[in-house]
Amino acid sequence: MTIRITIDRMLVERGMSVAEFADAIGITPANVAVLKNGRAKAVRLSTLDAICRVLECQPADLLRYEHE
């Protein structure tokens, strides 16, 4: 089982760079890369809240389940 975080598409749709996004949600660009590349083992609810606030979306818009 794998949960994927799909923020690439949302950033493109909103014309937002990784650096702008990282600054807006209060994490480093390196940590955004960890989320984007599927290397994150956990996401704080406060971070998920910030992501949804900045991207104006719901958590389900960001998370995708893949059965392996």
Image (cartoon, grey):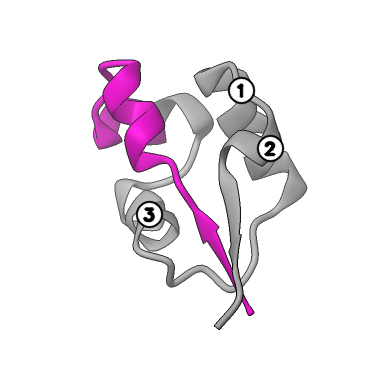
Is residue 7 part of the magenta span, yes or no? yes
Q: Please tell me in which quadrant of the rendered image residue 35 appears.
A: bottom left
Give the SS element for disc 2. Answer: helix
Q: Residue furthest front?
A: 67
The region drawn magenta spans 1-22
Q: Please tell me in which quadrant of the rendered image residue 22 appears.
A: top left
Image coords of residue 3 (percent x, y): 60, 65
Give the SS element for disc 3. Answer: helix
Q: Could you tell me which residue is drawn at 60 percent across and 49 percent down?
A: 63
As measured in the structure, the alpha-carbon distance from the residue carrying label 1 to the one carrying label 2 is 7 Å
Q: Earlier in the sequence, mark 3 or mark 2?
A: 3
As measured in the structure, the alpha-carbon distance from the residue carrying label 1 to the one carrying label 3 is 16 Å
Q: Are marks 1 and 2 in contact (CB under 8 Å)?
A: yes
Q: Which of marks 1 and 3 is nearer the N terminus?
A: 3
Position above or below: 54 against 8: above
Image coords of residue 68 (percent x, y): 55, 83
Question: What residue does disc 2 label?
Answer: 59
- In the image: residue 5, left or right of residue 37: right
As measured in the structure, the alpha-carbon distance from the residue carrying label 3 to the one carrying label 2 is 15 Å
Of residue 22 and residue 8, the one placed in the foreground of this image is 8
Residue type, label 3: Lys
Q: Could you tell me which residue is drawn at 43 percent across and 72 percent down?
A: 39
Residue type, label 1: Cys
Question: What residue does disc 1 label?
Answer: 57
